[in-house]
Image (cartoon, helix red, strand yellow):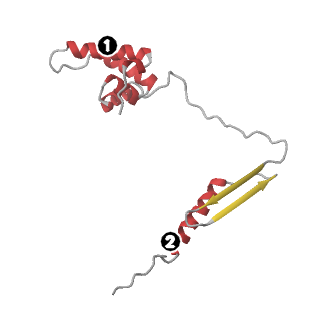
Amino acid sequence: MRTRSSRDLPARLDGLHRRFERWRRRRQGRSRIPEALWASAVRAAGEYGLNATARALRLDYYALKKRLEAAGGMSDGGTATTFVELAPPASGGSGECILELEAAGGAKMRIHLKGVEAPDLTALSECFWSAAVRHRESRPSRRPSRSRT
């Protein structure tokens, strides 16, 4: 597994990484991380994500998570998450779709839709796969019988 070098980091996170490394080189014994560094790490986690920040700064994930939650949770720069509905494009003509499913046991299904709205293909596929699995499990084994002499 490749470790992340400082040139792979965004500029702001790279600068913070260097500040942490400088502090680690100069600290006395096992002194605690200064609050100013923690505050910078929490801000970086809000911008770059908790895991990426903890890894880049070599911090304990759960300690950073606890401080991030205490500071008001993970934020994405102050913008609120909203629901956006994406309406399918209006079709001007007749759409066409061919769906072919084939299970390992040999069961096959082909659906050709033309000029109609598509049904719930996910549910249809799940029904097919579960039926194919039940069919395969109910069939007797095709192992050749061995005669003992």
Q: Residues within 10 Å of mark 1 (few under 14, many from 20)?
A: few
Kindly state the secondary structure of the residue where label 1 is placed: helix
Identity of the residue drawn at 76% across and 39% down: 89
The mark lying in front, picked from 1 and 2, is: 2
Q: 116 above or below 43?
A: below
Identity of the amino acid at label 2?
Answer: Glu
**For the N terminus, which image quadrant?**
top left
Identity of the residue drawn at 32% across and 14% down: 18
* Residue 137 tag number: 2
In this rendering, position of residue 11 left or right of residue 136: left
Q: CA distance from mark 1 to mark 2?
A: 61 Å
Give whichever of 126, 43 is nearer the camera: 126
Give whichever of 94, 29 is nearer the camera: 94
In this rendering, position of residue 129 left or right of residue 46: right
Q: Where in the figure is residue 71, as x and y percent of width and height?
A: 38, 24
Identity of the amino acid at label 1?
Answer: Arg
Check if mark 1's residue and mark 2's residue have beta carbons within 8 Å: no
Q: Which of the marked residues, 1 or 2, is nearer the chain's N terminus?
A: 1
In this rendering, position of residue 137 left or right of residue 21: right
Q: Where in the figure is residue 131, as x and y percent of width and height?
A: 58, 67
Q: Where in the figure is residue 88, as x and y percent of width and height?
A: 73, 40
Q: Residue furthest left?
A: 29
Q: Residue furthest front?
A: 149
Instruction: Tell me if I can see residue 118 in this picture.
Output: no
Give whichever of 103, 42 is nearer the camera: 103
The residue beneath circle 1 is 19
Q: Where in the figure is residue 65, as x and y percent of width and height?
A: 35, 30
Identity of the residue drawn at 72% across and 59% down: 111
Kindly state the secondary structure of the residue where label 2 is placed: helix
